Image (tube, rainbow, N blue to C red):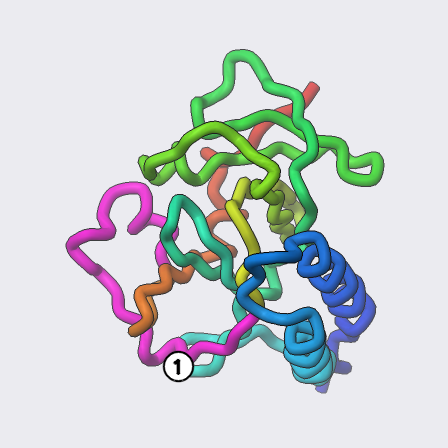
Amino acid sequence: MSEPIDTSGRWDQLRERLGELERRLGEGSDISTSELNKRLAARTRQWAGAAQPAELGEQLDVLRFSLSDELYAIGSEHVAQVLPLNQYTPLPSTPAYVLGIVNVRGRIVSVLDLRVLFELPHGSLSDRSFLLILHSADMEFGLLIDRVLGVATISCANLQKDLPNLSGVRARYLLGVTTEQCTVLDGARLLGDPDLRVMVE
């Protein structure tokens, strides 16, 4: 039997960054810093003892966020970090959904605007915009989001699929929709889609 994967260090970093983010959000936060840290600590202990990510029919830990007044979530195992989007560099000759690139601790990371990709209403960028960094073994990019709403655990068996109001490109990256109308994105499919790869010289 293989040894369990030790993810405690990565989750400690994520917990610290989300705690810092909650402090920056300040007024209007949907969850207190202490409650968020408590939940993230529980997730850390849970993931530290898990060798495999959750499959359909099981429980899935997600990070919830808002985007154009809609509620979204994505599996926590795909989340590297969340940070405020202070500045970015636009890239010429790229699709409209590519906002640009940012420097994250010496790494050049492309930033995708899901509002454009999903054809959602969007205005100008503001200080309420944040960068959600997703990563896999061979892919990393950032998603522009409005704000972080905290972590949660959902039952994959209860996710609704093939909804008529979620078609086209949004359905392509859809894992399902919860009973609270939270759209759960398929992080593995997003990270594995070659169409979302941005080549940076």
Q: Amino acid at mark 1?
A: Gly
Residue 35, quarter of picture:
bottom right
Residue at 43 percent across and 23 percent down: it is 96
> In x, y percent, where is residue 198?
57, 29
The residue under label 1 is: 57
* Left or right placement of residue 145 versus residue 34 in this view: left
**Helix, strand or loop at mark 1:** loop
Residue nearest the observer in this picture, 72 or 2: 72
Residue 86 pos. (x, y %): 69, 34
Relative to 5, 74 lies left or right = left
Quadrant location, the N terminus: bottom right
Is residue 51 visible in the rendered structure shown here?
no
Along the line of sight, the residue nearer the viewer: 180 or 80: 180
Residue 18 placement, left or right of 92 = right
Q: Is residue 173 magenta?
A: yes
* Residue 174 visible in this rendered orientation of the protein: yes
* Residue in view at x 45 percent, y 22 percent: 95
Q: Which stretch is magenta?
A: 151-174
Q: Is residue 200 above or below residue 133?
A: above
Q: In the image, 132: left or right of 14?
A: left
Residue at 26 percent of width and 69 percent of height: 160
